[in-house]
Amino acid sequence: MTVERHTQGRAAFAAARLATVAVALALGGCRVRFANEWALWLTPLVALAIAGYVISFVMRTRAIARFAPGQEERVQARVSLPMRAIRATAVVLALALVILSVSRPQYGGKEKMLRVRGLDIVLVLDFSKSMYAQDVRPDRITILKKEVYSLLDTLVGDRVGVVAFAGEAVSFPLTTDYEAIHLFLRDMQPNDMPLGGTNIGLAVARGTELLTSRYMPEKRSRVMILVTDGEDHEGGVEEAIGAAAQKGVHIHVLGVGTGTPELVPRYLEDGTQDGFMRDEGGNYVTTSLSADAEKALEEMAHATSGSYTRSAPGKISLTAVEKEIRKLKQSEMEARKVTIYEEFYLWFLLPALALLVLETFLGDARTGFFEWWSARVAARSRDDDAEKGKKT
């Protein structure tokens, strides 16, 4: 009997605690959700359990009346109906609590930012001699370098590589050491390229190789920033773009120059200007961003889900590219943001276990308490009947 009372006390304490928590959650306006909502479809089992106990009681009563006619009261005298009701209630409540615990109720909902990965960025920069053009002062290549340095100053935790290209491409592997990229670009000039001309297809292929190297196993967003005046002398661009798109590389293109032809300065080895470049026929060499070249650059960007921006006359600016990178970072941050909920299924499971333990200790036999209570109820009923008889 002591064990029974102890178990009842623990069950009552657990139920009181659960009720207190539920009230606190309701009054606090705390968000509550169920991680396993499918478990709530098991709720009809509670109704089936209740119906099962009711049917069992009715069938038992009918069976006694059939097999022991006239002995119903004597047979039922050994069984305590209140105890049977308490046991049935304990089982039904335990089932309901188990269903709630399986549904994994959660509360709270604190947003937590997981570790944000940086981007992999490759700068594919046109270092052909047309970048000596002075439609941007002092010249295109000088301003382009300054813009790249400004872009690097805004990056945090991103790996950056460089591909400088003309007829051939020179690459610098991805690194978070931005100062090393400064040193790589600082003294490089179009005259230093091993082969003249412009080979955009080769440059894009080299950039894709850097971004998808087997030494880059971590899943990161891949961005290629292509800065060029659009003049391509070698072909192979479509194949390179297709490979980049297939490997998930987003190419953002900045077109440099205008539709007006611009003379290309000629520089000696010591860096001094010696007039303007001429072709084999003695004609001045000019550069311009033609409508066909600009259309090809736009198609290149759209094929890789990137963007195309044309530089304003007299300017080279990577501001638009910086905005696209910020958007990509923001989308990745939102994807890495998770909501953490607190679990409290144990607050239902433990009372359910306590009720099942209680049910095993309880029996159907009448106890002294229930016999006393039944006698008291019967005596009170007789007293009420006698009082009514005296009044009449």
Image (cartoon, rainbow, N blue to C red):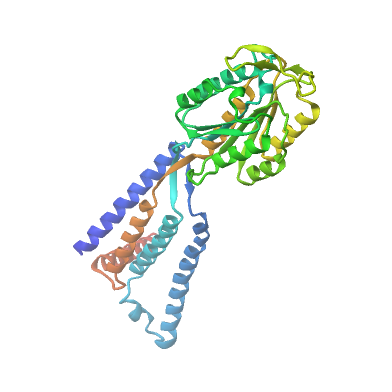
Q: Nearer the viewer, residue 102 or 95?
A: 102
Work out which quarter of the rendered image holds the C terminus and state it: bottom left
Relative to 73, does residue 249 appear above or below in the rendering?
A: above
The structure residue drawn at horizontal position 43% and vertical position 43%, both measured from the top left corner, is 341
4 to the left or right of 16 = left
Q: Nearer the viewer, residue 334 or 391?
A: 334
Q: Position of residue 36 (x, y in %)?
A: 49, 54
- Decide if residue 319 is in sight here: yes
Q: Quadrant of residue 374?
A: bottom left
Q: Quadrant of residue 210?
A: top right
78 to the left or right of 268 = left
Relative to 84, does residue 183 appear above or below in the rendering?
A: above
Relative to 300, does residue 309 appear above or below in the rendering?
A: above
Work out which quarter of the rendered image holds the N terminus and state it: bottom left
Q: Position of residue 132 (x, y in %)?
A: 66, 18
Q: Position of residue 263 (x, y in %)?
A: 74, 16
302 to the left or right of 162 = right
Q: Position of residue 51 (x, y in %)?
A: 49, 69
Outermost residue to the left: 2
Q: Nearer the viewer, residue 256 or 41?
A: 256
278 to the left or right of 215 = right
- Decide if residue 392 is in sight here: no
The structure residue drawn at horizontal position 41% and vertical position 88%, both measured from the top left corner, is 67
Q: Nearer the viewer, residue 80 or 24?
A: 24
User: What count of labels does the image hold?
Assistant: 0
